[in-house]
Amino acid sequence: MFDLSGKTALVTGATSGIGEAIARAFHTQGARVAGVGRRDHRLQDIQRDLGEGFFPFCCDLSNRDEVMSLVERVQEPLGDISILVNSAGLTRDNLLMRQSLDVWEEVMAVNLTSAMILSQKVLRGMMKRRWGRIINITSVVAATGNPGQTNYAASKSALTGLTKSLAMEVASRNITVNAVAPGMIDTAMTEKLTDSQREAMCQQIPLGRPGAPQEIAAAVVFLASDEASYMTGVSLHINGGMAML
């Protein structure tokens, strides 16, 4: 069940947190994984750990030229991409009245525009083979909002809209497009919280704890598999009950 053998997956944000967990889970399920991140040394560490089947690709997703050439770089050694996971996420928190346009555009470039470009680039091969999976990692704040995160929430809300509209466009070619919306997950982002902030957030979660990146990765593996062939346009919320949507 959930066997991904013979599939090639491109995973952005693969150097830490949720993206790394997804890359590792795909590798365990037999996929060849193109792991994408900005930190080359971290990609090399993961490659040494996983060995055969993991392929590192350094890319700055805020740089449009690098994003435009990424799929071609991956396909040259690995062939067509069967699974795309847009997991990279950037936060630059601030109240809207204090937020610069440059910061706004940087967040949009990484969280939204890169996902649009990469989706567009992989679709030709998926449509030709009449099989593909695109999975976008959004966020609970796309649905609930969060003070100080207008840029992040807006980018993830837009990514949700992209997911649903693209799902309609490509369903006839047996390509599914879904989103996973994590809540509070133990990652480098949440490490910045103080103990009191962390405790306050956990009190809002019925399950009483943050999630683990591996719990998000498990859902992404399912959505990438043949077993999820009848799911498309879905936003799967995984947040411990913090927001029951």
Image (spheres, rainbow, N blue to C red):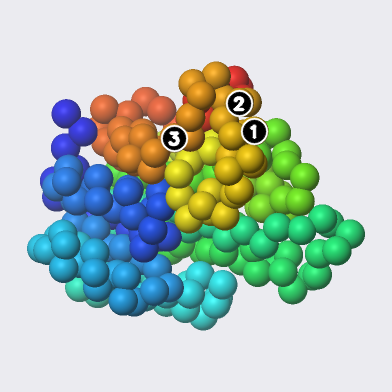
- Circle 1 or circle 3, nearest the eye: 1
Q: Which mark is residue 211?
A: 3
The amino acid pointed to by label 3 is Gly
Residue of label 2? 203
Look at the numbered discs 2 and 3 and tell me whether their residues touch, using CB distance below 8 Å: no
**Residue 220 at x, y percent in the picture:** 36, 39
Q: Tell which of 234 and 104 is nearer to you.
A: 104
Disc 2 is placed on an element classified as loop
- Sequence-wise first label, 1 or 3: 1
In the picture of the structure, the residue carrying the numbered disc 1 is 200
Instruction: Say if 214 sits above or below 92 in the image.
Output: above
At horizontal 55% and vertical 19% (from top left) the residue drawn is 206
* Residue 92 image position (x, y, % from top left): 67, 62
Q: Position of residue 50 (x, y in %)?
A: 16, 59
What's the CA distance linking mark 1 and mark 3?
Answer: 15 Å
- What element does badge 1 sit on? helix
Residue 200: image location, x then y, percent: 64, 33
